[in-house]
Structures are given as structure tokens and as C-alpha cells.
Amino acid sequence: MSDHPHGRDHAHGGEHGHHHPHSTTHGSAHDHDHGHSPSPSTLPLLEPHAGRGRVLFFDAFAGVAGDMTVAALLDLGVPVEVVERAVDALGLPGVRAISAPTMCGAIGARRFEVQVEALQPERTFAEIDALISGSALAPEVIDRARRIFRHLGEAEAEVHRIPLERVHFHEVGAVDAIVDIVGAATCLEYVGAEVVVAPLPLGHGTVECRHGVLPLPAPATVLCLRGVPTYEAGIEAELVTPTGAAIVATMASRFERWPAMQPQRVGWGAGTQRLPDRPNALRVVLGESDGSVVNQRVVLAANVDDMSGELAAHAIEQLMDSGALDAWATPITMKKGRPAFTLSVLADPPRVDALTTVLLRETSSIGVRRSLVSRVERPRRVIEVDTRFGRLPVKVSEGPFGPPQIKPEFDACARAARLHEVPVREVIAEAAARAREVV
């Protein structure tokens, strides 16, 4: 087995080298001949950190690649000079970043390319990491870029079953990945917003690289996307590249189809190949958050007709102890008129398998249903307040939904009530009153 993974992305984003053998030559359904050269966006450029307190949403309906990411952020309003200075700070001889307006079907967009005019050596992960960390880039950009590249390098190392230090990135491909990752890190640091990414579409087929043919999605892409929601796009093309996957998996704070926000600015980053059923572009949207959070959750459910109430209560307790967000029993009537109940669990996606095991272990059910749901959640925090019963924690839930919800932590109040020999409702009332004074 070679120690040299493909060190660059594939054809979807146009990340400068490999060509997908199955890429289509058909235009998007929205392709038009406008008879003129595209003009750049007329929006004023963004000021540094203009996105603080805002949401930067990656609407990746056609996937994501490194060059598409940088292009979209430049189209959003990051000055081109910011990326050019970042590339110069790397000190790579004969390497230039070029950006220009383009059309993606009927949509005005921007393209980002890397020009390599000097012979480039093969570079190991360790050499690239040292190059970035020793550059003249801002410390915050260095940190972002190193974390993204490490995520990519660890995926490549796992694919090829070699230590991270032995991973090599080939010539031009390494330069493309370096520039795309540093460019993306620079733009994201410049904007300064919370990054939210849509679930990612994955195509199928194969792609050629230096060492042969790989299945799509590429092996390193899949490993970079651990914990990221994905779905089948139904087309034969590479939609998510390893570099694009590493960027969003490292930088995103959460993944959802569309965050609750008020859109303010939009940027479009174009890819190079034409897709048969959608524009080949990444849309990024900068918006004001309304304070709410929409998270992807999973509901597990099992129907049970032969458990006692005691066993059901024990099962719920075990589920909560195993990390369930909530668990409950609902009375139902099953076949043949049997009284029964549905035992349901609300779970974070990473906890689904473990909670399914608990549900099957603690009940007599032989099957568990799984449903993906979205839950709008109030932003919440825990404060501590001083009362005559001691210092007590209080959960405060806020957001644009009316007055804050204030709820003292019951277990702490119950302990204080026992210690002071007073009714627990008295402790709860005083803790809530103190919290309202400071919220």
C-alpha cells in the first residue's frame, strides 16, 4: 500500500487537477446565455469581524469543496486582498490565488483558482503543518488552518493505514489544499460569524487519482464527515471533496437545513463541472440570528404490551442515565385490543445506538423505530443565586419567545429543603424570585 494519498481534491469543485470520469456534459436546467461578461457583486465589502453575533450559513445543496468555499466567502464581501495577503504569507514560490466573477447558470457567482508557476515538492503532513504554523499568518488563522489540515491528514492516514507523520501530499495537489484551507480559514476568521452548515448531499460513482480509481464519496471524505448529517443526492458526481469536508466538519458549530435567521448578505461560489439537476455552486448566507437554535434530534419508539409500570419506570430511568434528552411512556391500544404503551426517547444523534441498546435490553420489545426530527430550542444558561437556603442553580431559557423561562434545579432545591426542613416549594419560589432580579 502506498504511503501517498491523493493530496488534493477531485473534480467537483474544480480544485485544480483530477477529472471525474463520470462528470456530465449537460448543463444545469438554469443555464442561460446572457450575452455579457459577469460583473462582480455590487455590495460594499465587509468590515473585519462584521459577522460577530451573526450566523454564516452554508447552503450546500450542490455539496462543498475548498475552492467553492473561498469563492463564496469572497463573493459575500471578504476583500480579495485578504486572501492574497494570506497566500503571500505562506511563502510558497510561484503560487498565486486568482478570483474572478463568473456565471453559474443564471446566477452570478465567483470562482477561485490557484496558479502554480514553479515546481513544487512533495510535502508530508508534518512539513505542511510546520509551514502553516511558521508562517506570517495571524495566530487565529494559523489555528483554524492547522485544525482543518489535521482533520484532513488524520482521515488520509486512516484510509491508507499509516501514521499521520507518513502521509504525503503530492506536488500541485498539496499546494491546492494548502491554499484552499488557508484561504477558507482566513475568510472565516475575517467574517467572525458562527458557522452553520446544511446536511451534505453525496453523489456516487468513481474518481481517478494518482494511485488508481476510488469510489465516491472518496474514502477520506467519508472519514472527514464523521458526525456530519449527509444524504444521497441521486447523481453520479463528486459533490463533497475531502478538503471541503474537512473545512465544514472542523469549522461548523452545528448542522441544520436552514437556521432561524434574518438573511442579510448572500455569496455564491462556483464549481467547474456542470451538474445535471442543480447549479454547481455553494451559497453562503450571512444573517442575524433570532436567538433560537434548531437542532437535529432522533426519536426512538418501541411498543410494549407486557411490561409492568415498575419495569417501564426503571427503563425510563436507565435511558435518562444513558444520555437521553427525554424519555416518556404513552398509553396505546395494540392489536387484539391489548392495552399497552409506547416507550419513546429523544436522543442526540451520536447517542442513538447506545440508547437503542438500552431500550431493547430493558424492555421486551423486539424492534425500535427511529425518526429524525428538528427541535427548536430556546437558548439556555444556568445561573446561581444566593438564597437563605444557600446558593442554588437556576436554568434560564431566553430567546425571542416572550419573557425568559426561569426554573430552579429541582434536585438542588429538594436537597436544600431537606437540610433546612422546609417545603421544597418554598425553596423553589425563593430561588426563582432571586433569579428574576438578575435576569
Image: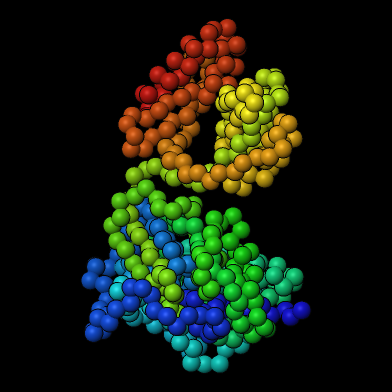
In this picture, residue 85 sits left or right of residue 103: right
In this picture, residue 357 sits left or right of residue 252: right
Decide which of 150, 387 is in the foreground and name it.
150
Q: Is residue 287 visible?
A: yes
- Residue shown at 47%/76% (left/top)? 13
- Residue shown at 43%/20% (left/top)? 432
In this picture, residue 326 sits left or right of residue 429: right
The quadrant in which the C terminus is found is: top left
Against 355, residue 147 (above or below) is below
Against 218, residue 367 (above or below) is above
Q: Residue furthest toward the front?
A: 336
- Residue shown at 63%/29% (left/top)? 335
Question: How many numbered marks does the figure carry?
Answer: 0
Residue 338 appears in which quarter of the rendering? top right
Q: Position of residue 174 (x, y in %)?
A: 57, 80
Against 341, residue 133 (above or below) is below
- Residue shown at 54%/62% (left/top)? 232
Q: Position of residue 220 (x, y in %)?
A: 63, 69
Q: Residue furthest toward the bottom?
A: 118
Residue 188 appears in which quarter of the rendering? bottom left
Against 289, residue 225 (above or below) is below
Colouring chosen for the image of the structure: rainbow
Q: Residue furthest toward the right?
A: 1
Q: Is residue 320 visible?
A: no
Q: Position of residue 155 (x, y in %)?
A: 65, 67
The quadrant in which the N terminus is found is: bottom right
Decide which of 407, 28 is in the foreground and name it.
28
Decide which of 413, 318 is in the foreground and name it.
318
Q: Position of residue 234 (x, y in %)?
A: 52, 66
